Amino acid sequence: MEIVVDDLSGPEIVAFLEEHVQEMRSITPLESKHALDLDGLRRPEVTFWSVKDGGALVGCGAIKRLDAAHAELKSMRTTSARKRSGVASLLMEHILNEARRMGFARISLETGSTDFFLPARRLYEKFGFHYCAPFADYRLDSHSAYMTRLLQTT
């Protein structure tokens, strides 16, 4: 598998992300949906990666700079056919290493609180994320779970 910085211009990633946003809209009330659309992901404070396997898109993820020391994990997604196959763990390890390299001391995330998001929350727990209060511009929301972790610099 190969993880590459993606400029979000290819039709495959555009369709993949549109499917992600539509799925989040079908599961989560609109006021609780925090998935970034393409314009949000193309902002300068966001670094976006695609995971490819034999040229096929199998996953993606991003980090958004909140301030000099704090980043937010965004748009983690694995294609349905590759869920629970190690794609998300490989990408998470890559993103955490890149966040450290970029100088961030903390990385936080918002995810859903329902059973649909349980595999995602377990993945984040596996990588050392702990539940926390809302951060940045988030507000307490029963549909959201907030998690954070410190990044050890080497």
Image (cartoon, rainbow, N blue to C red):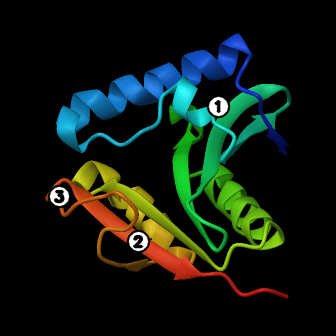
Marks 3 and 2 sit apart, C-alpha to C-alpha, by 13 Å
Q: Amino acid at mark 2?
A: Met
Provide the secondary structure element on which disc 1 rests: loop
Query: Where residue 127 appears, x then y in whole percent?
Result: 57, 75
Residues 120 and 22: in front is: 22
User: In terms of sequence position, does the residue under pointer 1 or pointer 3 come before the other?
Assistant: 1
Proximity of marks 3 and 2: CB atoms separated by less than 8 Å: no
Task: Report the disc number at residue 141.
Answer: 3
Marks 1 and 2 sit apart, C-alpha to C-alpha, by 24 Å
Provide the secondary structure element on which disc 3 rests: loop
- How crowded pointer 2 is (Cα within 10 Å; few <14, some 14-19, many 20+) is rated as many
Proximity of marks 1 and 2: CB atoms separated by less than 8 Å: no
User: In terms of sequence position, does the residue under pointer 1 or pointer 2 come before the other?
Assistant: 1
Q: Amino acid at mark 3?
A: Asp
Q: Which residue is mark 2?
A: 147
Residue 113 visible in this rendered orientation of the protein:
no
Provide the secondary structure element on which disc 2 rests: strand
User: In terms of sequence position, does the residue under pointer 3 or pointer 2 come before the other?
Assistant: 3
Q: Amino acid at mark 1?
A: Arg
Query: Where residue 122 appears, x then y in whole percent?
Result: 42, 68
Residue at coordinates 33% horizontally, 59% vertically from top-left?
118
Q: Quadrant of residue 146?
A: bottom left
Q: Which residue is mark 1?
A: 42
Camera-side mark, 1 or 2 = 1
Q: Is the residue 120 above or below the residue 128 in the image?
A: above
Marks 1 and 3 sit apart, C-alpha to C-alpha, by 26 Å
Residue at coordinates 35% horizontally, 28% vertically from top-left?
23
Q: Quadrant of residue 101?
A: bottom right
Q: Is the residue 106 above or below the residue 13 in the image?
A: below
Query: Where residue 116 appears, x then y in whole percent?
Result: 28, 48
Camera-side mark, 1 or 3 = 1
